[in-house]
Image (cartoon, grey):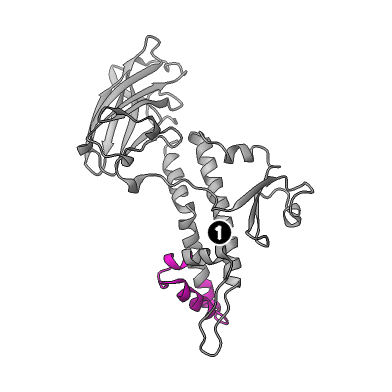
């Protein structure tokens, strides 16, 4: 981590791993999300949780620090409970372990489990480092939604190669391209970008790699949704002689319109969206306002907004 104190500290965060997780005495290894550093207790009904957490690092104790110890700080904003669990060091002093007993009554929507390192400096005990923070999820509403592309057929091709679509070949450094003319549309991802495919497909990415993967996934989803929406809007035709406006017949384009209609503040159905779009012709101000609202909706429904918030939260003190 970045030093924030007027005394020596560990430069990087310690690696923290949950090695065992039990609910009411029943081992629940499938509820340990090592990728997002979360314990998905919201998927079970329980009274008491037991968490075994191990922290380690190959960093050397900074000079002028002595008597290193560690603890886990449990904190839940909803229940306003904070508890400290002492960690036991191994013989090397570079690995600590703690077993936490957590009753359900002190866990609200979620609680944080933060490892803190304490050492003596100048005769006083000081916080000199932290570990990767885990979260204990108590209610389903706090479970993470992974950013990623919408349900489309996709293909990895080098955009500079002959097997790439003509439009993609004209932009060989672009990361993705949606061929809207195929039925159903196909999302092409550029395998010619070094490291791009391995990053997107990383199942157990952590810290910076996970954040970069999530941002790229959200960017792809946002671009695809934008392409689908613009194609869908182009297919909407105003009604004539008091007939209602008509929308796209392609299932994925109609689904895109339905998703937008659910999120806009003044449309309660896809038919109302069609009428709204049909009335935009010849009204530049209303058209600009519509697309501004649509852009905000796309950010929400593709996970772009949540991903940006989560990434900013993660790196706030890095």
Q: Position of residue 159 (x, y in %)?
A: 73, 48
In the image, 10: left or right of 171?
A: left
Kindly report the secondary structure that dominates the magenta region of the rendered protein: helix
| Residue ID for mark 1 | 225
Q: Which sits in the foreground, 132 or 100?
A: 100
Q: Residue furthest right?
A: 162
Q: Who's the residue at 68% across and 62% down the image? A: 181
Q: Position of residue 173 (x, y in %)?
A: 70, 48
SS class of the residue under badge 1?
Answer: helix
Q: Position of residue 170 (x, y in %)?
A: 76, 55
**Which quarter of the image is occupied by the C terminus?**
top left
In the image, 114: left or right of 219?
A: left
Per the image, is 265 magenta? yes
**From the viewer's perspective, is residue 119 above or below residue 103?**
above
**Which quarter of the image is occupied by the N terminus?**
top left
**From the viewer's perspective, is residue 22 above or below residue 106?**
above
Per the image, is 169 magenta? no
Q: Residue furthest left?
A: 105
Q: Position of residue 104 (x, y in %)?
A: 23, 37
Magenta segment: 260-289
Q: Residue furthest top?
A: 91
Q: Which sits in the foreground, 184 or 178?
A: 184
**From the viewer's perspective, is residue 148 above or below residue 245?**
above
**From the viewer's perspective, is residue 279 above or below residue 65?**
below
In the image, 248: left or right of 89?
A: right
Evaluate whether residue 152 shows in this view. yes
Quadrant housing residue 248 = bottom right
Q: Who's the residue at 34% across and 19% down the image? A: 97
Evaluate whether residue 68 shows in this view. no
Label 1 crowd bin: few (<14), some (14–19), many (20+), radius 10 Å: many
């Amino acid at each position: 981590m970045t030093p924030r104190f007027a005394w020596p500290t560990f430069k990087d965060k310690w690696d923290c791993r949950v090695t065992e997780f039990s609910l009411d005495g029943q081992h629940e290894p499938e509820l340990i999300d090592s990728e997002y550093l979360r314990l998905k207790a919201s998927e079970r009904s329980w009274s008491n949780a037991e968490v075994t957490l191990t922290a380690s690092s190959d960093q050397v104790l900074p000079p002028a620090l002595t008597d290193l110890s560690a603890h886990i700080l449990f904190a839940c904003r909803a229940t306003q409970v904070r508890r400290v669990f002492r960690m036991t060091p191994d013989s090397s002093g570079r690995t600590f372990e703690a077993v936490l007993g957590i009753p359900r009554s002190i866990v609200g929507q979620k609680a944080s489990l933060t490892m803190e390192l304490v050492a003596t400096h100048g005769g006083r005990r000081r916080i000199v480092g932290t570990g990767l923070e885990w979260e204990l999820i108590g209610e389903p509403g706090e479970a993470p939604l992974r950013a990623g592309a919408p349900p489309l057929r996709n293909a990895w091709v080098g955009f500079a190669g002959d097997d790439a679509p003509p439009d993609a070949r004209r932009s060989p450094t672009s990361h993705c391209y949606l061929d809207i003319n195929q039925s159903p549309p196909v999302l092409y991802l550029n395998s010619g970008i070094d490291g791009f495919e391995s990053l997107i497909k990383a199942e157990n990415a952590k810290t910076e790699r996970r954040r970069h993967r999530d941002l790229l996934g959200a960017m792809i989803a946002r671009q695809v949704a934008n392409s689908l929406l613009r194609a869908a809007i182009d297919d909407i035709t105003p009604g004539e002689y008091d007939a209602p406006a008509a929308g796209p017949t392609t299932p994925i384009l109609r689904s895109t319109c339905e998703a937008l209609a659910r999120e806009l503040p003044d449309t309660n159905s896809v038919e109302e969206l069609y009428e709204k779009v049909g009335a935009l012709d010849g009204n530049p101000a209303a058209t600009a306002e519509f697309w501004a609202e649509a852009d905000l909706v796309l950010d929400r429904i593709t996970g772009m907004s949540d991903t940006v918030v989560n990434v900013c939260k993660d790196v706030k003190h890095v």
